[in-house]
Amino acid sequence: MTTVQDPAAKISVRAVRKVFPLGGQEFVALGGVDLDIGDNEFVTVVGPSGCGKSTLMNILAGLETPTSGLALVDGREVDGPGPERGVIFQQYALFPWLTVRKNVEFGLSTAGVPKKERRERADHFIRMVGLEEFADALPKMLSGGMKQRCAIARAYAVNPSILLMDEPFGALDALTRVRLQEQLLTTWSMERRTVVFITHDVDEAVFLANRVVVMAARPGRIYDVVDVDLPYPRTEELRLSPEFTELRNRIWRSVYHQEAGRPAASTPSTTTA
C-alpha cells in the first residue's frame, strides 16, 4: 500500500493504536500516535514504564501490527520486517559459535553477498566500532559493551537506511554506557542513518538526539517533542553545560511530572538532520 506522507519524512506514524487482550479485557498500549522523523535524523524516545515505547518500536520494525492507523517508511506501509530497517535490542543476540567477523558477516551471507565483499564490508564496520583487534574472537571473550558494539557493526553492515534501537545500552554499567553513547554518535556521524533510539535514561536521550520524543502512558501517546539545539560532536563538556542541564530538566519534568489530562503533542514534526 502506498500513501502520502510529508516528503521530508523518512518515517511517518499516523494515528497508530495498539490494543492487546488482557484477562478478557483490552489494554490500550498506544492510543493514537502521530509522528514524522526526517531522513538521517537521530530521535530518542523516553517515557514512564508502560507508555508503549517498545510497542511503537516493534511496529516500526514490523514485529507488531497496529490495531488501527499506519506506520510508513518512505511512503510505504510497514507490513513486516525489512532490510531497510536494522533492529538492535538490549540483548546482544550474537551467535555464540561465530567470531565477531562472522557475526558481522552473517546478514551479508544470507543476502548472497560474495565472500570477498562480505569480508571487506565486515572489516570496515568492525574497524568503525573499534573491534579490529577482536575480529577473530568469540562473543564469550567480549565484554558487554564490546558485544553491543559488535551488534551495531552487524546492523550497519547490511546497509539499512534506518536503525531501530530498543534500550541497547540499558544493561551496561554507567561508564561503558557513556563510552558507547560517544561511539554511537561517532559512527552515526560517519555513516549517517535515521535512528530511533528508545531509552529510559533522560541524560542519554538528550546527549544523543536531534529531537526527544516524550511519551505518556494509559494510553500510550506522545506527550511532548523537544528539539535538542546542541552542536555535534557532543562532548563531556557539553554534558556539564547549562544548556544541557536546562534541556535535561525540561524533559525530566515531562517524563516524571506529567500533567494529568494534558493532550498529546498537537502535530507530527519532522526535522532533517
Image (tube, rainbow, N blue to C red):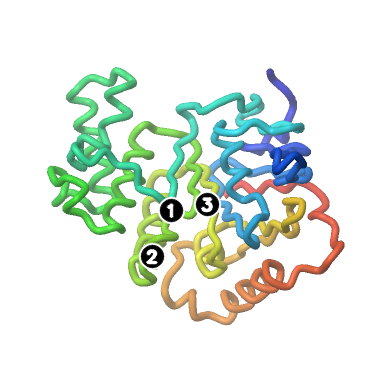
Residue 267 locus on image (x, y percent): 80, 48
| Labelled disc at residue 90 | none
Q: Quadrant of the N terminus?
A: top right
Whether label 3 touches label 2, CB < 8 Å:
no
Instruction: Measure the C-alpha gap from mark 1 to mark 3.
Output: 8 Å
Side (left or right) of 100 relative to 160: left
At a point 73% along the width and 32% down the height, the residue shown is 67
Instruction: Measure the C-alpha gap from mark 3 to mark 2.
Output: 14 Å
Q: Mark 1 — residue?
A: 168
Along the line of sight, the residue nearer the viewer: 45 or 5 = 45
- Camera-nearest label, 1 or 3: 1
Residue 229 locus on image (x, y percent): 61, 64
Badge count? 3
At a point 21% along the width and 51% down the height, the residue shown is 131
Residue 10 vertical placement versus 50 (above, below): above
The residue tagged with tag 3: helix, strand or loop? strand
Label 1 Cα crowd, 10 Å radius (few <14 / some 14-19 / many 20+): many
What residue type is disc 2 on? Arg
What residue type is disc 3 on? Phe
Along the line of sight, the residue nearer the viewer: 197 or 18 = 18
Side (left or right) of 193 relative to 213: left
Q: Mark 3 — residue?
A: 197
User: Which quadrant of the view contains residue 28?
Assistant: top right
Q: Which residue lies furthest to the front in this view?
A: 23
Instruction: Measure the C-alpha gap from mark 2 to mark 1.
Output: 9 Å
At a point 17% along the width and 49% down the height, the residue shown is 132
What residue type is disc 1 on? Pro
Residue 238 locus on image (x, y percent): 48, 74
| Labelled disc at residue 177 | 2
At a point 64% along the width and 76% down the height, the residue shown is 249
Label 3 Cα crowd, 10 Å radius (few <14 / some 14-19 / many 20+): many
